[in-house]
Image (spheres, grey):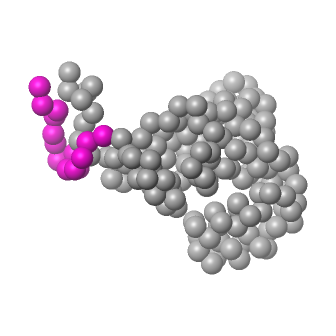
């Protein structure tokens, strides 16, 4: 049976992103929707900037970020990154606390790259003006990662 088509289906190769396509996609200034559990055990989803290094997602949070405190207490996370073409990367993992809130830690270089990627020179200017604000640094190595190139329907939906 052929997969359904509609005006909402983008033509092209149906399937997962190749590792090279995935890395190029994750190099774009797209928001990551980070899902975690809050202190009361409720799902909490927040849009965050991220950096992908080919093996892990890096996240920098302000000292008083609710999601950072949640990750420190319970490191299980879900991640969802997508664009308007239907391309997406969705996964789960365990956040590793690399740095508690500090000024001048490893987070600075990562935050600098993210600020420029997401906001250009205005981002770099903002970051420089706020370097005295302590931030957390987390790494998330995905335990489960699914990608999709945004074209067509996966065959499982045609059954």
User: Which quadrant of the figure contains the C terminus?
Assistant: top left
The magenta stretch spans residue 107: no
Q: Quadrant of residue 132?
A: bottom right
Position of residue 67 relative to residue 137, above or below, is above
Q: In the rendered image, which quarter is residue 72 located in?
A: top right
Give the residue displayed 76% in from the left and 49% down from the top.
Answer: 137
Q: Establish if 80 lies above or below 124.
A: above
Out of 108 and 35, give the one closest to the viewer. Answer: 108
Main SS, magenta region, reads loop
Who is closer to the viewer here, 39 or 21?
21
Residue at 64% across, 76% down:
122
Q: Which residues are magenta?
A: 1-15
User: Horizontal and vertical percent for residue 74?
Assistant: 74, 29
Residue 16 visible to an observer of this rendering: yes
Q: Quadrant of residue 79?
A: top right
Residue 3: x, y in percent?
Answer: 17, 32
Question: Residue 5 placed where, x, y %?
Answer: 15, 39
Looking at the image, residue 117 sits to the left or right of residue 22; the answer is: right
Horizontal side, residue 87 vs residue 31: left or right: left
Q: State the image coordinates of residue 141 (x, y, percent, origin top left).
A: 63, 39
Residue in front for this viewpoint, 122 or 146 = 146
36 versus 30 height, above or below: above
Point 11% across, 25% down: residue: 1
Q: Is residue 63 visible?
A: no
Residue drawn at 44 percent across, 47 percent down: 19
Residue extending furthest top? 159
């Amino acid at each position: 049976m052929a997969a359904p088509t509609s005006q909402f289906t983008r033509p092209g190769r149906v399937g997962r992103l190749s590792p090279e396509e995935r890395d190029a996609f994750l190099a774009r200034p797209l928001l990551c929707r980070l899902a975690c559990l809050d202190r009361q055990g409720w799902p909490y989803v927040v849009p965050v900037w991220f950096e992908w290094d080919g093996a892990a997602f890096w996240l920098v949070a302000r000292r008083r970020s609710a999601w950072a405190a949640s990750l420190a207490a319970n490191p299980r996370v879900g991640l969802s990154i997508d664009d308007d073409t239907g391309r997406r990367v969705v996964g789960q993992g365990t956040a590793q606390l690399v740095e508690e809130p500090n000024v001048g830690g490893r987070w600075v270089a990562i935050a600098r790259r993210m600020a420029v990627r997401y906001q250009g020179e205005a981002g770099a200017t903002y970051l420089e003006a706020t370097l005295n604000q302590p931030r957390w640094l987390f790494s998330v190595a995905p335990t489960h990662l699914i990608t999709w190139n945004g074209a067509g329907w996966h065959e499982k939906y045609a059954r």
